[in-house]
Image (tube, rainbow, N blue to C red):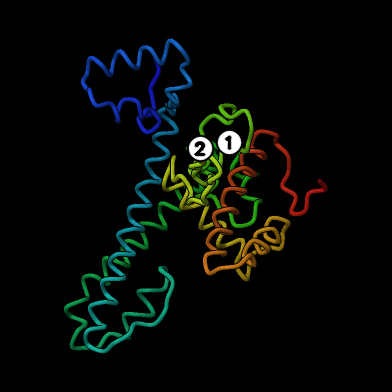
Amino acid sequence: MIVANPRQVQLISANCSKNDSNDSKLLARLARVDASLLSPLLHRSEKEQTTLLSIRARAQLVKTRVALMHSLRGMVKGFGVGLPHATSDQFFQRCKGSVPEKLLPHLESIFSIVQSLTQKIDNYDERIEKIAAEHYPVVQGLKTVPGVGTLTALTFVLTIADPGRFSKSRAVGAFLGLRPRQQQSGGQNPQLGITKAGDIYLRKLLVQSAHCLLGTYGQDTALKQWGLKLCQRGGSNARKRAVVAVARKLAVLLHKLWVSGDLYRPFPAN
């Protein structure tokens, strides 16, 4: 059975005579000529899909917590109160005391929910750490890359599923939508944004890892030096482009380490 990627089969979506009969005939003809034209999708195992469920659930809790924290800041701002800067883990302790006494009874429940969500997220973090240590030993090697934690490494392994599906590690960047789009025509070759194909959440994690690596406290590596040089190449968007480029390099690096089994080297010889 071949499961086609609908995003890559524009012959169907752009067909002026689109119906079930024409769609099935077109799919059959494409499969007969060259199945790769359908960009076949690889199904994950039940074990991998179940583990990803914990990661998706954690991501949803994080999203809900962020939305509640922004709502709290916005509601008290209307009364001339600015909540102090705080990380998600410290939000309850640092910000609740800054709310005036007359407003606190109205916001107590939201603060309690934020605190509860933080505890639930910590529980998911412990579960993810345990799953990675017991069932996915390759994650330990991938975590040696600066900026990459257990969550990112495990999500990468589960999303890719089979590292042998790519003939070259460079193809992983394109698979995750971190490759620039192309629309070359004649002598014109405009610079476009990335394709944003593939898994959105993994791409987000890799971008966060790139931010961490390029940050002040990021470990000095050849990749960081390369990214900082890109930041210096003109324009206000230079750092954004550099972060995406480093995220793409991280994806390629993680796949290379996974396939080869080599140890990570901050400054490779070649």
- Residue 131 appears in the picture as rendered: no
Quadrant location of residue 107?
bottom left
Look at the picture and state if 48 lies above or below 240.
above
Given the current orientation, which residue lies at the most extreme front position? 187
Mark 1 belongs to which amino acid? Ala
Q: Residue at x 62, y 48 (%)?
A: 249
Q: Are marks 2 and 1 in contact (CB under 8 Å)?
A: yes
67 w.r.t. 262: above or below:
below
Which disc is residue 171 wearing?
1
Q: Which residue is mark 2?
A: 175
At horizontal 23% and vertical 14% (from top left) the residue drawn is 21
Q: Is residue 181 visible?
A: yes
Q: Position of residue 1 (x, y in %)?
A: 39, 14
x and y, in percent, of residue 147 in the image = 59, 57
Across and down, in percent, residue 196 comes to: 44, 46
Q: Residues within 10 Å of mark 1 (few under 14, many from 20)?
A: some
- What is the quadrant of residue 30 in the picture? top left
> Residue at 58% across / 45% down in the picture?
251
Report the disc number at residue 194: none
